Amino acid sequence: MKIRKAKLTDVPNIHRLVNHYAGERIMLPRTLTDIYENVWEFTVVAEEDGRLVGCGALKLYNQEVAEIRSLCVDESLKSKGVGREIMEELLDEAEAFGLKTVFALTVVPTFFEKLGFHQVPRERFPTKVWRDCLRCERYTCCDEKAVTMEIVDRPPKLEKSAAEAAEVSS
Ligand SMILES: CC(C)(COP(=O)(O)OP(=O)(O)OC[C@H]1O[C@@H](n2cnc3c(N)ncnc32)[C@H](O)[C@@H]1OP(=O)(O)O)[C@@H](O)C(=O)NCCC(=O)NCCS
C-alpha cells in the first residue's frame, strides 16, 4: 500500500468510497464535480493494483484553520491503522502549511480522540455551520460531534503504523 496525494484519475474511486459511507448516512455525500474541483485537498491510500482503500481531505478555511473531511477507509481494511496513517499525513500537511487548528464534524469522535482531538461545541466553527450544516437535511437531527486539535498540541506519531507494517509485509 502507498499513501500519496490524489491524482485526477483517483476521483471516481474517491467518489465511490465517500458515497458508500454517505449512503449509510455517516458522511456527507460529495459529487464528482466537487471532488474534481478540490482534488488537491485529498490524500489517498492505494494498493499496488491501483485500488483505492482510503482517502481524506484537508479543507483550508483561512490562514489558521482547516477541516479534516471525507476521511474514510474501505470496509475490508478498517481497524488496520489506515485511517490513522491518512490522518497523520493530513496533520503533516497542516503543519507544513503553518496552520494552528484542525477540526472535523464526525459520528466517530472516539477515533479522533485517539489521535489527539477533543470535543468542542460546533458553534466554535461558524463557517462550517454556515457553509455545510445549514444546507444539510439532517441539520435539526444531526448526531455529528465537533472535534478539534491545536497543531501545537499534536501527539507524537506512533513508531510504525499498521499501514506501514502491512506495506512491509506485502
Ligand atoms: C473512522 C475510520 C476512518 C477509522 O479508520 P481505521 O483505519 O478503521 O482506524 P485505525 O485502524 O487507524 O484506528 C486508529 C485508532 O482509532 C480507533 N478507532 C477506529 N475506528 C473507531 C471507531 N469507529 N470507534 C472508536 N474507535 C475507533 C482504533 O481502535 C485505533 O485505536 P488504537 O490505536 O488505540 O488501537 C474508518 O473506520 C471509516 O472509514 N469509517 C467510516 C467513515 C467515517 O466514519 N469517517 C470519519 C470521518 S467523518
Image: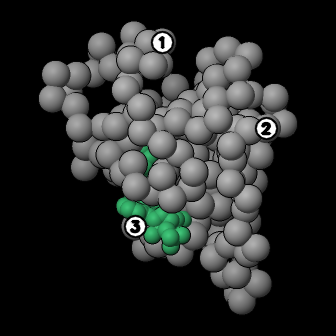
Residue corresponding to mark 2: 95
Give 42 or 52, whichever is nearer the viewer: 42
Q: Confirm if mark 1 falls within 8 A of ligand 1.
A: no
- Dot placed on the residue nearer the N-terminal end, 3 or 1: 3
Circle number at residue 71? none
- Dot placed on the residue nearer the N-terminal end, 2 or 3: 3
Residue 49, image x and y in percent? 66, 71
Q: Residue at x 67, y 14 (%)?
A: 62
Residue 28, image x and y in percent? 36, 35
Q: Residue at x 77, y 46 (%)?
A: 92
Residue 33, image x and y in percent? 52, 26
From this viewpoint, which residue is outermost toward the front?
153
When asked about the image quadrant of residue 166, the answer is: bottom right
| Left or right of 139, for residue 90 | right
Q: Secondary structure at mark 2?
A: helix
Of badges 3 and 1, nearer the viewer stands: 1
Q: Secondary structure at mark 3?
A: helix
- Dot placed on the residue nearer the N-terminal end, 2 or 1: 2
Q: Residue at x 23, y 38 (%)?
A: 143
Alpha carbon of mark 3 to alpha carbon of mark 1: how far?
31 Å
Residue corresponding to mark 1: 127
Residue 18, image x and y in percent? 43, 46
Give 65 or 74, whichever is nearer the viewer: 65
Alpha carbon of mark 2 to alpha carbon of mark 3: how far?
29 Å
Circle number at residue 75? 3
Is residue 134 placed above or below 113 in the rendered structure?
A: above
